[in-house]
Amino acid sequence: MSDNWNIKDILETGVAFDYGAGLVDADQTALSTGFPSLDSACVGTGGKGFAHWWYVVIGGASNVGKTQLLLHLVRKAAEQGLNPGLITMEVPLTGVQRSMYSHLTRYGYTDFLPDNWATPDVEEKIKDLSKDVGNYAQGTKSIMVAEHDGAPSLNQIMEMCYALKAAGCGVIALDHLQLIKQDRGYDIGELATQVSEELRRFAHREKVLVLALSQLNRVASRDRTQRPIAQDLWGGTSMESNANVVVLLDHSLVIRDMERPHLMRTRLLLDKNREGPNRVAINVEANFAQGVWREGMPDEEELWIDDKTRR
């Protein structure tokens, strides 16, 4: 018999006793997302957010803020002492640093243009940047970034997941799944199945929260009039079926504030949730200047009604 199998009679008294004992002092680690409605929908953690052993897929069309939402969650994880690790395959390491540092320090995004550092006071700027980052970290926060230049194989991705786990990361984020290299002979559906099954097994076995970005298929990405659903994820139903939670960015409602172009309003769609209610729509606002996302308040509903709806 294969060593991978673990067979137990769950009606045996000793097995039941072991299960009950395992609930005592169980690890209650969860990532609070910063969206109260999303956290409260996670019944499996008592409404605290994403559990440490979940595999969560965040999907959306291009240019709707997926990467910025992922970085928001990575910052939340750092602030909660979960030591996140980010595997980046699209945004270079320096791009991640620029985005994070512009939100954590006195310097804004455009301040990091090289021309702005070709000044006589550049040494003071470098010292100020280092000081601000150190003040944010306070010796207790960390964000580990693993950069891959090109398309890594699934084996390389899993090796990095285990390396980040060994380095103490309690949350591992991947940006994004479509850049994992396809093996010869596999079509997109088979590759999606391989990727999603491996990441699910890793999260469950190693008790690490895995957050993975996924694009939508081409048909769903082109149609900006329809709300996306989990079955629209790249690779089809296998990507959705392996996830504990699927959160989608609603590209059918993207409202830009013309007076404050750094603000965007959209909806998070909790389309799949093994641990609580699904089909939940949450109004959210992204402040790209500060890297902050927030949930809309009940008395702000009017802000999430676009011109098409008004007509």
Image (tube, grey):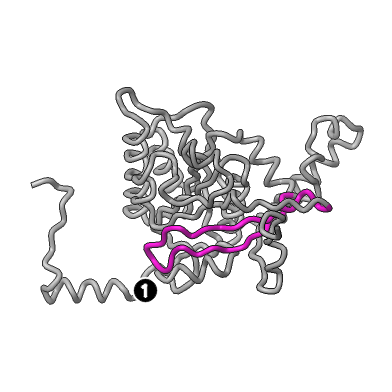
Q: Is residue 192 above or below residue 27?
A: above
The magenta span reads 259-288
Q: Is residue 306 above or below residue 91?
A: below
Q: Is residue 257 above or below residue 28?
A: above
Question: Is 74 a magenta residue?
Answer: no
Which quadrant holds the C terminus?
bottom right
Q: Which residue is mark 1?
A: 25
Residue 176, given in percent of the width and then of the height, sits at 50, 39
In the displayed orientation, state which residue is furthest to the right: 120
Please indicate whether residue 255 sits to the left or right of residue 115 in the image: left
In the displayed orientation, state which residue is furthest to the top: 184
At x 34%, y 36%, the residue is: 189
Amino acid marked by disc 1: Asp
Please indicate whether residue 6 sits to the left or right of residue 147 in the image: left
Q: Is residue 210 above or below residue 279?
A: above
Residue 66, given in percent of the width and then of the height, sits at 58, 46
Residue 168 visible to an observer of this rendering? no
Prevailing secondary structure class for the magenta stretch in the rendered image:
strand
At x 42%, y 43%, the residue is: 161
At x 57%, y 52%, the residue is: 250
At x 34%, y 55%, the residue is: 204
Question: Is 285 a magenta residue?
Answer: yes
Residue 107 visible to an observer of this rendering? yes
Residue 165, given in percent of the width and then of the height, sits at 43, 48
What is the crowding at mark 1: few (fewer than 14 residues within 10 Å), some, or many (at least 20)? few
